[in-house]
Amino acid sequence: MSDLLRLFRKLAQANRLANARLHRACAALDPAELTVPRPAFFGTIQKTLNHILMVDRFYLDALAGRPLDRARLDEASFCPDLASLVDWQAESDLDLIAQVESLRPETLTEIVAVDRGERVQHDRRDDLLSHVFQHQTHHRGQVHGMLSATGVRPPQLDEFIVGDDAAARAEDMARLGWSEADLMR
Protein backbone atom coordinates (compact mmCIF):
# COMPACT_ATOMS: atom_id res chain seq x y z
CA MET A 1 0.00 0.00 0.00
CA SER A 2 2.83 2.44 0.65
CA ASP A 3 3.78 2.05 -3.03
CA LEU A 4 0.23 3.04 -3.99
CA LEU A 5 0.47 6.12 -1.77
CA ARG A 6 3.75 6.99 -3.49
CA LEU A 7 2.14 6.52 -6.89
CA PHE A 8 -0.79 8.80 -6.04
CA ARG A 9 1.61 11.42 -4.67
CA LYS A 10 3.68 11.37 -7.85
CA LEU A 11 0.56 11.50 -10.01
CA ALA A 12 -0.69 14.53 -8.07
CA GLN A 13 2.67 16.24 -8.59
CA ALA A 14 2.73 15.27 -12.28
CA ASN A 15 -0.76 16.70 -12.57
CA ARG A 16 0.41 20.04 -11.11
CA LEU A 17 3.44 20.17 -13.38
CA ALA A 18 1.47 19.29 -16.53
CA ASN A 19 -1.18 21.91 -15.79
CA ALA A 20 1.50 24.55 -15.20
CA ARG A 21 3.18 23.66 -18.52
CA LEU A 22 -0.11 23.72 -20.39
CA HIS A 23 -1.13 27.05 -18.86
CA ARG A 24 2.22 28.64 -19.76
CA ALA A 25 1.71 27.56 -23.37
CA CYS A 26 -1.84 28.91 -23.38
CA ALA A 27 -0.62 32.21 -21.94
CA ALA A 28 1.57 32.60 -25.04
CA LEU A 29 -1.54 32.66 -27.23
CA ASP A 30 -3.33 35.81 -28.24
CA PRO A 31 -6.25 35.85 -25.72
CA ALA A 32 -8.76 35.61 -28.58
CA GLU A 33 -7.26 32.24 -29.56
CA LEU A 34 -8.55 30.77 -26.29
CA THR A 35 -12.16 31.12 -27.41
CA VAL A 36 -11.82 30.33 -31.12
CA PRO A 37 -14.17 27.43 -31.97
CA ARG A 38 -12.18 24.25 -32.56
CA PRO A 39 -13.08 20.62 -33.32
CA ALA A 40 -13.07 19.34 -29.74
CA PHE A 41 -15.63 18.10 -27.24
CA PHE A 42 -15.98 21.46 -25.45
CA GLY A 43 -15.28 23.50 -28.58
CA THR A 44 -12.58 25.88 -27.32
CA ILE A 45 -9.38 25.83 -25.34
CA GLN A 46 -10.91 28.04 -22.61
CA LYS A 47 -14.01 25.87 -22.20
CA THR A 48 -11.89 22.72 -21.98
CA LEU A 49 -9.61 24.25 -19.33
CA ASN A 50 -12.69 25.43 -17.46
CA HIS A 51 -14.11 21.91 -17.55
CA ILE A 52 -10.90 20.46 -16.12
CA LEU A 53 -11.08 22.90 -13.22
CA MET A 54 -14.79 22.34 -12.61
CA VAL A 55 -14.42 18.56 -12.42
CA ASP A 56 -11.39 18.88 -10.16
CA ARG A 57 -13.37 21.08 -7.79
CA PHE A 58 -16.30 18.68 -7.86
CA TYR A 59 -14.27 15.60 -6.94
CA LEU A 60 -11.84 17.30 -4.57
CA ASP A 61 -14.75 18.72 -2.59
CA ALA A 62 -16.29 15.25 -2.39
CA LEU A 63 -12.98 13.64 -1.41
CA ALA A 64 -12.61 16.23 1.37
CA GLY A 65 -16.16 15.60 2.61
CA ARG A 66 -17.40 19.00 1.47
CA PRO A 67 -20.97 19.33 0.16
CA LEU A 68 -21.85 20.06 -3.45
CA ASP A 69 -21.19 23.75 -4.15
CA ARG A 70 -22.89 24.61 -7.43
CA ALA A 71 -21.78 28.27 -7.28
CA ARG A 72 -18.14 27.19 -7.05
CA LEU A 73 -18.60 24.75 -9.94
CA ASP A 74 -20.33 27.41 -12.06
CA GLU A 75 -17.50 29.84 -11.31
CA ALA A 76 -15.06 27.30 -12.74
CA SER A 77 -17.26 26.35 -15.70
CA PHE A 78 -17.73 29.93 -16.82
CA CYS A 79 -14.32 31.38 -15.94
CA PRO A 80 -13.89 34.09 -18.59
CA ASP A 81 -10.12 34.54 -18.52
CA LEU A 82 -6.95 32.51 -18.40
CA ALA A 83 -5.33 34.43 -15.53
CA SER A 84 -8.14 33.57 -13.10
CA LEU A 85 -8.27 30.01 -14.33
CA VAL A 86 -4.52 29.55 -13.84
CA ASP A 87 -4.75 30.77 -10.24
CA TRP A 88 -7.80 28.66 -9.47
CA GLN A 89 -6.32 25.54 -11.10
CA ALA A 90 -3.12 25.98 -9.10
CA GLU A 91 -5.21 26.10 -5.91
CA SER A 92 -7.04 22.95 -6.99
CA ASP A 93 -3.78 21.20 -7.88
CA LEU A 94 -2.28 22.07 -4.50
CA ASP A 95 -5.46 20.85 -2.78
CA LEU A 96 -5.09 17.53 -4.62
CA ILE A 97 -1.45 17.25 -3.56
CA ALA A 98 -2.38 18.02 0.06
CA GLN A 99 -5.20 15.48 0.03
CA VAL A 100 -2.93 12.79 -1.39
CA GLU A 101 -0.13 13.64 1.08
CA SER A 102 -2.59 13.11 3.95
CA LEU A 103 -3.62 9.63 2.81
CA ARG A 104 -2.84 6.49 4.76
CA PRO A 105 -3.21 2.94 3.44
CA GLU A 106 -6.51 2.47 5.25
CA THR A 107 -8.03 5.67 3.83
CA LEU A 108 -7.56 4.55 0.23
CA THR A 109 -10.36 2.01 0.48
CA GLU A 110 -12.77 4.27 2.38
CA ILE A 111 -16.10 4.84 0.69
CA VAL A 112 -16.63 8.49 -0.24
CA ALA A 113 -20.08 10.01 -0.63
CA VAL A 114 -20.15 12.14 -3.79
CA ASP A 115 -23.05 14.60 -3.67
CA ARG A 116 -24.37 14.99 -7.21
CA GLY A 117 -27.37 17.06 -6.17
CA GLU A 118 -30.09 14.71 -7.34
CA ARG A 119 -28.33 11.64 -5.97
CA VAL A 120 -25.35 10.56 -3.90
CA GLN A 121 -22.72 8.36 -5.49
CA HIS A 122 -20.62 6.07 -3.29
CA ASP A 123 -17.19 4.96 -4.45
CA ARG A 124 -13.82 4.04 -3.02
CA ARG A 125 -11.38 6.90 -2.51
CA ASP A 126 -8.67 5.25 -4.64
CA ASP A 127 -11.11 4.76 -7.51
CA LEU A 128 -12.17 8.42 -7.35
CA LEU A 129 -8.56 9.57 -7.32
CA SER A 130 -7.79 7.35 -10.30
CA HIS A 131 -10.75 8.89 -12.10
CA VAL A 132 -9.53 12.43 -11.38
CA PHE A 133 -6.08 11.66 -12.79
CA GLN A 134 -7.54 9.98 -15.89
CA HIS A 135 -9.95 12.86 -16.44
CA GLN A 136 -7.17 15.43 -16.19
CA THR A 137 -4.94 13.53 -18.62
CA HIS A 138 -7.77 13.03 -21.11
CA HIS A 139 -8.77 16.69 -21.30
CA ARG A 140 -5.23 18.08 -21.16
CA GLY A 141 -4.63 15.93 -24.24
CA GLN A 142 -7.52 17.67 -25.96
CA VAL A 143 -6.05 21.10 -25.15
CA HIS A 144 -2.68 19.83 -26.37
CA GLY A 145 -4.32 18.85 -29.66
CA MET A 146 -6.04 22.22 -30.01
CA LEU A 147 -2.75 24.02 -29.34
CA SER A 148 -1.29 22.09 -32.28
CA ALA A 149 -3.57 24.14 -34.54
CA THR A 150 -2.16 27.44 -33.23
CA GLY A 151 1.19 29.15 -33.54
CA VAL A 152 2.16 28.00 -30.03
CA ARG A 153 4.04 24.73 -29.71
CA PRO A 154 2.21 22.34 -27.36
CA PRO A 155 4.30 21.49 -24.29
CA GLN A 156 5.62 18.09 -23.34
CA LEU A 157 3.16 16.76 -20.76
CA ASP A 158 4.41 13.27 -20.02
CA GLU A 159 8.05 13.71 -18.98
CA PHE A 160 7.91 13.73 -15.23
CA ILE A 161 7.56 10.54 -13.24
CA VAL A 162 10.65 8.44 -13.92
CA GLY A 163 14.16 9.30 -12.85
CA ASP A 164 15.40 9.61 -16.41
CA ASP A 165 13.04 12.59 -16.91
CA ALA A 166 14.98 14.70 -14.37
CA ALA A 167 16.61 16.94 -16.96
CA ALA A 168 13.31 17.51 -18.78
CA ARG A 169 11.57 18.58 -15.58
CA ALA A 170 14.39 20.54 -13.88
CA GLU A 171 13.18 24.01 -14.90
CA ASP A 172 9.59 23.24 -13.95
CA MET A 173 10.63 21.69 -10.65
CA ALA A 174 12.60 24.83 -9.79
CA ARG A 175 9.67 27.04 -10.80
CA LEU A 176 7.37 25.04 -8.51
CA GLY A 177 9.89 24.96 -5.65
CA TRP A 178 10.18 21.17 -5.69
CA SER A 179 13.26 19.01 -5.27
CA GLU A 180 14.19 15.71 -6.85
CA ALA A 181 14.57 14.24 -3.37
CA ASP A 182 10.97 15.09 -2.52
CA LEU A 183 9.66 13.77 -5.82
CA MET A 184 11.53 10.48 -5.77
CA ARG A 185 10.95 9.60 -2.11
Image (tube, rainbow, N blue to C red):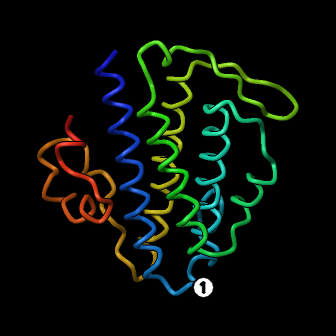
Q: Amino acid at mark 1?
A: Ala
Check the image and name the residue furthest to the right.
118
Residue 51 picture quarter: bottom right
Return the x and y of residue 156 as percentages of the image width and height.
Answer: 30, 61
Quadrant of the rendering where the N terminus is positioned: top left
| Left or right of 142, for residue 88 | right
Residue found 22% across the figure and 57% down from its top = 169
List the residue tagged with mark 1: 32
Residue found 60% across the figure and 54% down from its top = 53
Return the x and y of residue 72 as percentages of the image width and height.
Answer: 75, 53
Position above or below: 177 against 35: above
Q: Residues within 10 Å of mark 1 (few under 14, many from 20)?
A: few
* Secondary-structure class at tag 1: helix
| Left or right of 42, for residue 141 | left
Residue 104 picture quarter: top left
Return the x and y of residue 39 as percentages of the image width and height.
Answer: 59, 65
Position above or below: 29 against 18: below
Front residue of this view, candidates 144 and 70: 70
| Left or right of 153, for residue 119 | right
Total numbered badges shown on the rendered structure: 1
Position above or below: 79 against 103: below
Front residue of this view, candidates 65 and 137: 65
Residue 185 picture quarter: top left
| Left or right of 136, for residue 181 | left
Residue found 79% across the figure and 24% down from its top = 120
Return the x and y of residue 52 as percentages of the image width and height.
Answer: 58, 53
Residue found 27% across the figure and 53% down from its top = 178
